[in-house]
Amino acid sequence: MSDDVKYVSGWRIFLRRFCGHKAALIGFLTLMMPVGLVLSSFFYDGYDPTTIRPWIAGKGILFSSPVCLSENVFTVGESVPTLFSECENSLEFDVMGFSQKEFRIVLKEGKVAQIRESGKSDPLQELHVIPEGAVKYEQIFLSDKPEGLTEEFSVKVGEVLPMILTEINRVAIVRSTSYDYIPQNYRIELENGEVASILKNGKAVKECKFEGEFVTLSKFDGELETLMYGFGTDMLGRDLLARVVYGGRISLMIGFVATFVSLIIGVCYGAISGYFGGRTDRLMMGTVDVMYAVPFMFLVIILMVNFGRNIYVLFMALGAVQWLTMARIVRGSLLSLKNSQFVDAAKMSGASSWQIIFQHLLPNTMSTIIVYTTLTVPAVILEESFLSFIGLSVQYEGRNLDSWGALISYGVQAVGSDGGRIWILLFPAIAMVMTLIGLNLLGDGLRDILDPKSKK
């Protein structure tokens, strides 16, 4: 052998062909963007997909707000809430003051019989509500449904209701809020994770409570702290970026685990059918043909309805219907290989049928199996998304898991007829589309790369 001839490993050949295949490379890079974002959540615990902040609901891309909870409670001698646990020395909040009033309007025979303010014994003779101004309208309940009103109106005892309130039959409840636009300052000194002292506008108090809706500024150890919502927020004020990231965990886990289940079943079933042939092959492939005639999505829905929407049931349900094509592919590969010379050599050396199947034949079909596996994952993700879209979202311990499919379904409802909140639908849809395109391009590329006859 010439000294100029060097041994090149199979992995080096694969990498060289992979880097030279444009479709495979583009597919891999496209896939890595959403997958990398999802994987980042395992190393960064700042994502929070569950915290509801109603006062920032439906905010757009790159929106930021002060760091705060729905209800902030600090008591001297007690630990600070978990959200503020990383702060070492002091917390400071500027909070817009407010007061809320509730009025009850009682009707009798179509006229106003009584007007009362909550907490006061003396009834009112007249009530004037201004949607915007010193007394800001917050909510009016018409019958059992809250309806938003923006018009100014007045009611008087003994008179009929104005036209704007004609749907009320017996009682209307009006809530109004007055705002103090001069912020109150809260300074909380900390010691070993506990509240050492609280100053409200410079005066010491034992406890303070304020709602996050009215926080205009927050500082941790003197530094201004805000939360940035890169993808905006949904209709409950939850971080959409965090929801997309955690939704990707669910979709990718279902895609890969269900594909793995179908891979195990399909490879074993197809290998046995293809190697033994004859009556065994006819019986096993006949069973596959019968199962092909059953609408597989209908079968998955039946399994989930009868056995629950548990995530483990979904793994088995999707895996149980995806193995049919894999079984046929493996069977066809083994039929073409089982009469090869290396199989005859293995038989002559005393190898059993199972050793020949799993040690000699299946390794020679791995390229086909790998390619089809990359194409099965996006199919499973799409099927799970369809189930979530029709209301059969996966559950774990009785709690719905928001996969990309569930987020897209939620986004369709949240966008509205004017399309004003399109980002709630757009980002989970982009993440799923990029994953599906990446997997399909990668699968097509691997098919060419692993084909020994390919010259690419």
Image: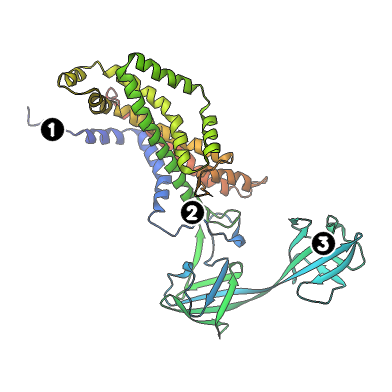
User: Which residue is at the front of the view, 411 or 418?
Assistant: 411
Give me the residue at 47% from left, 43% from top. 311
Label 2 – label 3 distance at C-alpha = 42 Å
Residue under pointer 1:
6
Q: Residues within 10 Å of mark 2 (few under 14, many from 20)?
A: many
Residue under pointer 2:
242
Q: Position of residue 409 (x, y in %)?
A: 58, 43
In the structure shown, which secondary structural element does the residue marked by tag 3 occupy? Answer: strand
- Looking at the image, how many numbered discs can be counted on the residues? 3
Looking at the rendered image, the disc whose residue lies closer to the viewer, 1 or 2, is 2
In the structure shown, which secondary structural element does the residue marked by tag 2 occupy? Answer: helix
Q: Residues within 10 Å of mark 1 (few under 14, many from 20)?
A: few
- Residue 305 seen: yes
Residue under pointer 3:
171
Give me the residue at 44% from left, 72% from top. 87
Q: Quadrant of the C terminus?
A: top left
Amino acid type of disc 3?
Answer: Val
* In this view, 273 is above or below 219: above
